[in-house]
Image (cartoon, grey):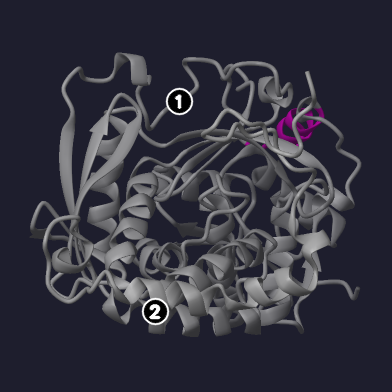
Amino acid sequence: MAQPSHVALAYSGGLDTSVIIPWLKEHYGGCRVTAVVADVGQGDDFDEVRAKARASGADAVHVVDVRRQFVTDYIYPALRAGAVYEGRYLLGTSLARPLIARVQVEVALAEGCDALAHGCTGKGNDQVRFELAYQALAPHLAVIAPWREWTLGSREEEIDYARAHGVPVPVTREKPYSMDQNLWHLSFESGVLEDPWAEPPADMFRLTVDPAAAPDAPEYVEIGFERGAPVALDGRPLDPVTLVEALNRRAGAHGVGRADLVENRLVGMKSRGVYETPGGTVLMEAHHHLETITLDRDTQHYKALVAPRYAELVYNGLWYSPLRRALDAFTAVTQETVTGTVRVKLFKGACVVVGRAAAQSLYSHDLATFGRGEGYDHKDAAGFIRLFGLPAKVFAASHPDLTRDGPALPVETPAGRRGPGAPRR
């Protein structure tokens, strides 16, 4: 790689990225460093973040508020797709990284930078997510990953380096875990959580109360959707950011949205993560239930097959891939009818859908009722069953030896005689 003259750094204000600023200048002959901060709802004091970046040696600092884009262009597409990685993880970090990388690339292009840098370690998924986004959005820019180059091998060594280079290091108790927060979730990894047998510390959680300490009375919330996107709470229209924030507070107060799982990382290892996604848990459950009355059977079943693949693409950093865009096009068509309201009960860590309604619902009481209803003739079922079972009937006639699973069962006959497979007494 040629010597870079101006580097755009994805900056968080934490120890790693603060140390990276003087390291880049020292390692690359005094190159300019522009710190880029994407506000995806992490709740930081951005004046403080700007000041820290400057104090660490940054030549310029850009803070870009992309909270609305994060919800509308990243979170909601994943929600409409039903994307949940390995059935548990709602992809909070995975969805934010491609947007953060996009902000970084746009600033780099506007500022005339010739390199991009990130603070991801060489063991995690995030290095892949950032660098695949770089390749898709600005393949001509060089990529610097200090964790794969420098000799700093521990937090203590980073602190010593920071102090030696005048980087402000707050004197605080070291957290026993790593956290990442945005509008969609708060994640915890490493430290005490690296033992999959160890229970997460009770004081670790920030967005959700302990379900055992949650209110003794349930709370009901009604979520309005239009074409698969949430648009209202309890009948009141809300902008996307406000809606997610409000639902985070309400669901979190009831202990909803905790997940403790061991996931398969893209880089080949298993990793234990604990996640808080209160609002996202409610929205994902509500959206699924609305689809049960607004999607026809074949579309609903096929969409369920596509959803894990969509989640895998996001998790693996392939947000800017042709396949993800193609799956979005498929999902967009499926969501044309997903408009309605879902009522959810929040209680002691549980999120239970207790009602769903849609003006163009496919649910018909007359068809579904066990009582007398119009539009369904029970006699029609006989011919349907004969035709539906015809392939099995033909196969059984041709291969009677392959039809039964195992020997005949010892079934008692009405007259007390035992079936042919019964042992003799």
In the image: residue 78, left or right of residue 228:
right
Q: Position of residue 243 (x, y in %)?
A: 23, 54
Asked if residue 164 is among those painted magenta in the image, a careful observer would answer yes
Look at label 2 and name its amino acid. Answer: Thr
Q: Identify the main secondary structure in magenta.
A: helix
Q: Secondary structure at mark 2?
A: helix
Q: Residue at x 52, y 61 (%)?
A: 83
Q: Residue at x 66, y 16 (%)?
A: 198
Image disc number at residue 352: none
Q: Secondary structure at mark 1?
A: loop
- Mark 1 vs mark 2, foreground winner is 2
Q: Residue at x 29, y 40 (%)?
A: 352
Considering every residue shown, the one lying at the far front of the view is: 415
Residues in magenta, as a range: 157-167
In the image: residue 242, left or right of residue 49:
left
Image disc number at residue 334: 2
Q: In front: 118, or 197? A: 197
Q: Position of residue 230 (x, y in %)?
A: 26, 63
The residue carrying mark 1 is 205
Q: In front: 411, or 72? A: 411
Asked if residue 406 is among those painted magenta in the image, a careful observer would answer no
Look at label 1 and name its amino acid. Answer: Phe
Q: In front: 8, or 262? A: 262
